[in-house]
Amino acid sequence: MNLVASPSLEQPSPPPHAVALPTVTARARVLAVGLIGPGRVGSALLDQLRAAQPRLARAGLELKLCGVAASRRMWLDADDPELNGRFGGAQTWRPGNLDEFAAHVRGDGDRHAMLIDCSASDAVASRYPEWLATGLHVVTPNKLAGSGPLWRLQAIRAACGSGARFRYEATVCAGLPVVQTLRDLLDTGDELLAVEGMFSGTLAWLCHRHDGSRPFSTLVREAHALGYTEPDPRDDLSGLDVARKLVILAREAGWSLSLEDVDVESLVPRALAALPAEQAMEHLHLLDAPMARQVARAQTQGSVLRHVASLDAKGHARVRLAVLPAAHPFAHSRLTDNIVQFTTHRYRDNPMLVQGPGAGPEVTAAGVFGDLLRIAESLEVR
């Protein structure tokens, strides 16, 4: 049965090519997939899966799209190719029910099944432990599972004892291999001493463009028009999203860090933060004076402004706008680049850097796709 592309994107994006595909076998591995959250990332993912289907089939992997769940409705594929072919068109939707949706994707329990959560819903993330416990694999770019209550993450990890796998590479830097790199360092016996990085493609772009020649609010509006920011740009400027990513990495390294433990310096003035969402865009000029002072201070020192998150060996975590010397590695990043620097026992004198585009639905979807393929590599033929 063919996966179908969402109509929201005209051209399919290529799948990630750095991940090895499953070895060709006499019989195909079949993986049933249910997608939660057919928004920008979810739609891009469907396009990538559709474009990759012939290649995956040659490699012995058959993907079966079993359904799509939005916030309030869902459709379930009852092995009807015509229904699958009408996705995004005239297919029959029904009221959303996550219990029914998960049960449908899981089937009779005699097949490999996966839920992909491309929502940003805490309610959906709260269901991961029960899904994993029933044998459903879970892949997600949703940061709320890894950065939410620590007890929930512990429950998720415990549920993986059923044999189901939980992967979340795209929660930190979209398609960049940041979580996997850290995991490989730790699993091979290295010791993490510090993490420092630029974790927001939006804020990276704003810092690169902000040289004092134009008001900062003008750049924010431009980024918003380009689709780089959240619908409310204050969600990016607050630093909270970056703090979540730092918490995920800290927990991956074994530290029991919570969001409340991160010292977050918001770029949003109190007067702007207090406004209702519908008024925020009209008052972005409140950002201009404080940001003009920041860039002037950096230029006076021959330095640059960068939005940086850091975690030291004692578990102290901080998110801030930093003035960095022109020779700093972060000073040479480009456009929406994310960049993460790992200082470890092995890489103490010359820290390891992971760098590349960290914003946009296509690269985030590619990170999710990569996680799907890594799970598929471990599946046996049924």
Image (cartoon, rainbow, N blue to C red):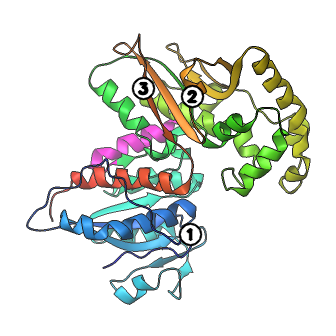
Give yes or no for residue 161 being in the magenta stretch: yes
According to the picture, the residue beneath numbered tag 2 turns out to be 332
Cα distance in 3D space between marks 2 and 3: 27 Å
Q: Could you tell me if residue 30 is visible in this image? A: no
Cα distance in 3D space between marks 1 and 3: 33 Å
For label 2, the SS is helix
Indicate which disc residue 253 carries: 3
> Which x, y percent locates residue 26?
8, 67
Tell me what residue is drawn at x 48 percent, y 24 percent: 341
Tell me what residue is drawn at x 79 percent, y 51 percent: 221
Local crowd size for mark 1, using a 10 Å CA cut-off: few (<14), some (14–19), many (≥20): some
Label count reads: 3
Tell me what residue is drawn at x 66 percent, y 28 percent: 306
- The image quadrant of residue 9 is bottom right
Kind of residue at badge 1: Ala
315 above or below 241? above
Local crowd size for mark 3, using a 10 Å CA cut-off: few (<14), some (14–19), many (≥20): some
160 above or below 55? above
Give yes or no for residue 261 being in the magenta stretch: no
> Which x, y percent locates residue 233?
75, 48
Local crowd size for mark 2, using a 10 Å CA cut-off: few (<14), some (14–19), many (≥20): few
Image quarter hosting the C terminus: bottom left
* Nearest to N terminus: mark 2 or mark 3: 3
Kind of residue at badge 2: His
Q: Main secondary structure of the magenta part?
A: helix
76 above or below 281? below
Kind of residue at badge 3: Ala
According to the picture, the residue beneath numbered tag 1 turns out to be 70
Write the start and end of the magenta stretch as one range.
149-165
